[in-house]
Amino acid sequence: MKKLKRSGRLVDMTYFLLQHPHEIISLTHFAARYQSAKSSISEDLVIVKEIFEDEGYGSLLTIPGASGGVKYIPKVGKEEASELVDSIIEQLAVSDRILPGGYLYMMDVLGSPRFNKMVGRLFSGALADKQIDAVLTVATKGIPLAYAVADYLNVPVSIIRRDHRVTEGSMVSINYVSGSSKRIQTMTLARRSIEPGSRVFIVDDFMKAGGTIRGMIDLLAEFEADLVGIGVLVESVEVEEKLVDEYISITRISEINVQEKKLKVEAGNVLDKL
Amino acid sequence: MKKLKRSGRLVDMTYFLLQHPHEIISLTHFAARYQSAKSSISEDLVIVKEIFEDEGYGSLLTIPGASGGVKYIPKVGKEEASELVDSIIEQLAVSDRILPGGYLYMMDVLGSPRFNKMVGRLFSGALADKQIDAVLTVATKGIPLAYAVADYLNVPVSIIRRDHRVTEGSMVSINYVSGSSKRIQTMTLARRSIEPGSRVFIVDDFMKAGGTIRGMIDLLAEFEADLVGIGVLVESVEVEEKLVDEYISITRISEINVQEKKLKVEAGNVLDKL
C-alpha cells in the first residue's frame, strides 16, 4: 500500500476495523500498512474512536502494552436501539402476515440482509461485554439472524437440522417435545460443529412455548458446551407457561387473532439489556 | 449529529457507505448530516473514492444532476480476488473433509461469517455490472453464502426448502431428479417470496451433476422470474455430463478419492469473470 495522508488513512482504517470486529489489531499493523509513525496512528484512532462512540457504532478499545492495539466492538446506543426496534415492529406488525395456527409469515423480512443486520446489531449490542465462542440456531428461519449476530461478534455459527443429511458426517440427535403442539420431534447437529466447553449464544426467529429452544439447550448439553444467552426475534405472549426463563427478545406479540386478522406487536425486553 | 471536521466526516461517511451498498446517497443527505457545504462533501467523496478504488474495496459511482449523489458498488480487484480464492482453496483442501459418497464436510467453513464474506465478495464482484433483484438458494448449506452475496448486492434472499413447512403460507413445489443419485426429489418455495419478472442470481454450496440447480431454474420459471446467473462455491469435475452450462464457480475439485482420502481443490472460473 502506498503512503497515505491522514485523510486516506482514516477511510482505510474505518474500512479495516469494520471488517474485523472483536479482533485485536496492533498499532504495528497499521503503522506498517500506512508507513506512518505509531504516534500518528494513535492520533488517527482517537478520531475514529470519537466518531464510533458519539454515533453509537460501537467502541474502540485500546489494549496497552507491546502486544497492544485496538479492538472494535460493535454496539448500539440506547436511542438508536429504540429506533431499530421501532422499525422492526413496524415491518412485522402487518396483519397479512398471520398464518393458520397463529404463526407469522416472516420470510420477507428474514430475506432482507438489511433487516437481519438490524437484529444482529441489537443482539450483539446486548452481548458486547460477554465472551461468546459460537452462535447456535435451528434450520431454516433462524439461520440469517444467527449469521447477522455472529458476523458482529466475529464467531462461527452452528446449525441444528430437523433431518439427517448424509453430507455432514456423524451427527448427535435428540428428541424434544414441541411446547405448543406437544408433538415429539428430532433435532440433530453435526458432531464436529461445536467444541466442548464452547460458550454459546442461541438464536431463533420465533418462540411460542419455547419447546424448540428447550431442545436446543438439551442438545448443547450433549456437546458439553455452555449456554451464554438466548435471543429471539419474536416472542408470543399467548402461552401461559414458557419452557425457557431467561432470554432476549426483540419484539413481542401482544395480540394475535387469526379470524379477525388482528396483530399487535410491541417491543421485547432487548432495550433493558443494553 | 454535531458539525464535523473533514477527518470526522471521512470516518462517518466510510461507515455509512459500507452500510448502504448499491444505494444512491444524495449529496444533500451528507451535507445535512454534517452541516457542511456540498462542495466540501464532494471533496470528501473524492478522498473516499480514491482509497476504495486503489485498495479494490469497490467503486464509488457519481450520479450527476439534481437527484444525484454517490453509489458504493462493492468490487474486488484481480489481485485480491486471486488471494481470496487461494485462501478459500487452502481452507477447503483438507482431506478429512471427505465424507462417504464423495461429499465434503463444509459446515466449519460455511459456519464462518468471515469465510462466507470472502465468497460473497467474489460473487458480487463478478456481478457488479448486472442488475439483480434477488438471490435464490436452497436450504440448508447454500443459505449463508446467499446472504453474504445478497448483503453486498443489497437485495433480498429467497430460500427453497425440501420440506413443506406450515409457517410459510402457500407454496409452489416441483419435482426434480438429483443428477448424481438419479432420485426424484421435491423442492418448494413460498408463493410470495419471488415477484414475477425479478432478475435472480442462484447460489449453492456444491454442484455435482447440477440436478439441484436445474431444479431451481425450473422452479424459477414457475415464478416467471429471470435467471441472471448461477454461483457455486465448489464444483465437482468427476461428472461427465453437467446439467447446467453457464455458472460461476469459486473452486473446483480436481481429484477426490474416498478410499485413499485424497482431495485436490483448484480455482474455479470466477477469476475469469471479474
Image (cartoon, coloured by chain):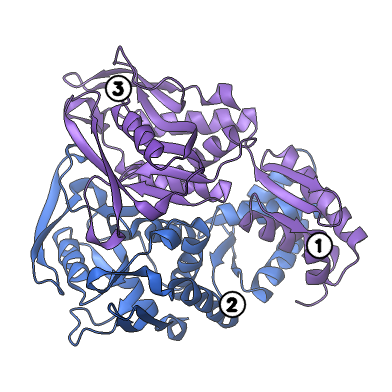
Chain colours: A purple, B blue
Q: Quadrant of residue B258?
A: bottom left
Measured in 3D between alpha carbons, the distance from the residue under mark 2 to the one under mark 1, in whole angstroms, is 23 Å
Name the kind of residue labelled 2 in the image: Glu
Name the kind of residue labelled 3 in the image: Ala
Which residue in the structure is indicated by mark 1?
A: A7
Q: Position of residue A141 (x, y in %)?
A: 32, 43
Q: Say the numbered circle drawn on residue A209.
A: 3
**Of labels 1 and 3, the one closer to you:** 3
Q: Using the rendered image, report if marks 2 and 3 lie on a common chain.
A: no
* Subunit of label 1: A
**Residue at image point 82% right, 60% down:** A27
Q: Quadrant of the C terminus of chain A?
A: top right
Name the kind of residue labelled 1 in the image: Ser
Q: Say the numbered circle drawn on residue B80.
A: 2
Measured in 3D between alpha carbons, the distance from the residue under mark 1 to the one under mark 3, in whole angstroms, is 53 Å
Q: Position of residue B159 (x, y in %)?
A: 28, 53
